[in-house]
Image (tube, grey):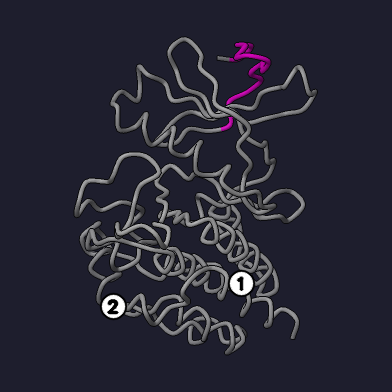
């Protein structure tokens, strides 16, 4: 693919490969900027469902404009392959950053506040991400958080709607388990409908790992992990890392409440509490 031209974009190098497609760095020859292009290869990712999820991602992210969410520019097509052209964000994923070394408390709080702010914008637009995890969060070279991958996103109903939940694309198969086990909410793990509080739980699992250096929910099999998500509490955060402020532990505990009603109702309230702590 190196040197391939897709519309006004010339591919320069491969950045990575995910479940939904391959990602490349490209040069926009018209606007003279770098972009990232995710390509769903028809020969390697066959299946209408994958294509619909891919298009769904392109449709979800532009529903809002936020500095902590990767901007989608447009959809392109190349030789029968669908392509998403998006903002190029040099840096590394949160998963890669945490693998390198334990985050300082200030650093973790700085990133957590940005993640919550991005979720607040998504939830205000009635979009539930459904796959918040360290691998879907990029930390730029300047320390800015960027949330990626809205391929599993769902849009919540408006007040006029009588549906309990509606996909941006086709409805997910009832009782299907969608997401990443260690970061799923209990209702996700049970294949139940989800709302913004599910993202809050996933953010809480991510925050716990950011501050402690260990995953909140572990296991030697997917079944064990999901069982822990549903019925087991993680080790108290301050017993793992005593220097974490009590207020931070309280916020994360609320995020990780098993009952959706006991969590923050959306990213907006979560972001507000994190901002209060940072000001202190």
- The residue segment tinted magenta is 2-15
Q: Residues within 10 Å of mark 1 (few under 14, many from 20)?
A: many
Q: Label 2, on which residue?
A: 232
Q: Label 1, on which residue?
A: 271
Residue at x 53%, y 55% (from the top left corner): 125
The picture places residue 173, in percent across and down from the top left corner, at 22, 46
Magenta span includes 264: no
Q: Which of 280/182 is in front?
A: 280
Looking at the image, residue 97 sits to the left or right of residue 153; the answer is: right
Query: Spatial distance from mark 2 to mark 1, Cα to Cα?
Result: 26 Å
Magenta span includes 8: yes
Q: Which mark is residue 212?
A: none
Residue at x 40%, y 44% (from the top left corner): 168
Q: Quadrant of residue 215?
A: bottom left
Q: Quadrant of residue 279?
A: bottom right
Q: From what the image shows, is residue 166 above or below residue 187?
A: above
Q: Secondary structure at mark 2?
A: loop
């Amino acid at each position: 693919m190196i040197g391939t031209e897709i519309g006004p974009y010339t591919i320069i190098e491969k950045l990575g490969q995910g479940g939904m497609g391959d990602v490349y760095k490209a040069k926009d020859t018209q606007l003279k900027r770098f972009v990232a292009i995710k390509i769903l290869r028809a020969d390697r990712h066959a299946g209408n469902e994958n294509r619909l999820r891919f298009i769904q991602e392109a449709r979800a992210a532009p529903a809002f404009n936020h500095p902590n969410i990767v901007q989608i520019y447009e959809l392109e097509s190349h030789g029968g392959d669908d392509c998403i052209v998006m903002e190029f964000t040099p840096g590394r994923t949160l998963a890669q950053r945490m693998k390198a070394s334990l985050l300082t408390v200030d650093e973790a709080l700085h990133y957590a506040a940005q993640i919550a702010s991005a979720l607040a914008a998504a939830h205000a637009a009635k979009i539930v991400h459904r796959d918040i995890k360290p691998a879907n969060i990029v930390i730029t070279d300047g320390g800015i958080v960027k949330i990626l991958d809205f391929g599993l996103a769902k849009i919540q109903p408006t007040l006029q709607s009588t549906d309990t939940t509606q996909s941006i694309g086709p409805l997910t198969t009832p009782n299907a388990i969608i997401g990443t086990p260690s970061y799923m909410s209990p209702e996700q793990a049970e294949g139940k409908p989800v709302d913004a509080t599910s993202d809050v739980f996933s953010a809480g699992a991510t925050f716990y790992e950011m501050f402690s250096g260990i995953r909140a929910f572990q296991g030697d099999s997917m079944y064990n992990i999901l069982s822990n998500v549903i019925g087991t509490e993680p080790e108290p955060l301050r017993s793992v890392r005593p220097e974490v402020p009590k207020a931070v532990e309280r916020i994360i505990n609320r995020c990780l409440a098993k009952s959706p009603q006991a969590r923050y109702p959306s990213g907006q309230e979560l972001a507000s509490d994190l901002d209060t702590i940072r000001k202190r």
